[in-house]
């Protein structure tokens, strides 16, 4: 199932506004959160070639982030979220990545 266009950050201005915010980070991800005027959460996602040289690794990380976001989107409604993968994410297991993302979603939910 695809993430609909309403649920994605598509404009450069949205990314710029998020990048002005203070990020929350761990070994695998940097997350930037900003309230939005809509009643739903939107996701921006970056996994650079510098972070993961192989396309299969970049795609795996993006797939896991999107899947985790879909599950958590009702809890974090009303926020724009930018997820930037770090190098450590490439060598981390899928289970551990899901756990780390869940911790970030909980943090956003508790704000």
Image (cartoon, helix red, strand yellow):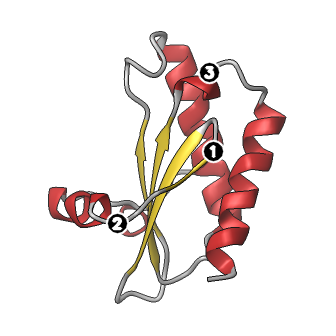
Q: Is residue 77 left or right of residue 45?
A: right
Residue identified by numbered label 2: 21
Q: CA distance from mark 1 to mark 2?
A: 16 Å
Residue in the image at 51% along x and 36% along y: 85
Res 7 → quadrant: bottom left
Residue identified by numbered label 3: 90
Q: Which mark is residue 62?
A: none
Q: Quadrant of the C terminus?
A: bottom right
Question: SS for tag 3?
Answer: loop
Residue identified by numbered label 1: 26
Res 18 → quadrant: bottom left
Q: Position of residue 88 (x, y in %)?
A: 62, 25
Looking at the image, do the residues carrying marks 2 and 3 touch, with CB atoms under 8 Å apart? no
Q: Is residue 53 above or below residue 99?
A: above
Mark 1 or mark 2, earlier in chain: 2
Mark 1 or mark 3, earlier in chain: 1
């Amino acid at each position: 199932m695809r993430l609909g266009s309403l649920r994605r950050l598509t404009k450069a201005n949205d990314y710029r506004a998020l990048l002005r915010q203070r990020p929350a980070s761990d070994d695998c991800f940097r997350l930037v959160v900003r309230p939005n005027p809509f009643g739903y959460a939107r996701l921006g996602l970056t996994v650079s070639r510098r972070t993961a040289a192989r396309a299969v690794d970049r795609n795996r990380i993006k797939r896991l982030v999107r899947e985790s976001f879909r599950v958590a989107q009702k809890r974090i409604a009303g926020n724009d979220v930018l997820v930037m993968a770090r190098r450590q994410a490439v060598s981390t297991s899928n289970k551990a990545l899901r756990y780390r993302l869940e911790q970030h979603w909980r943090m956003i939910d508790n704000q």
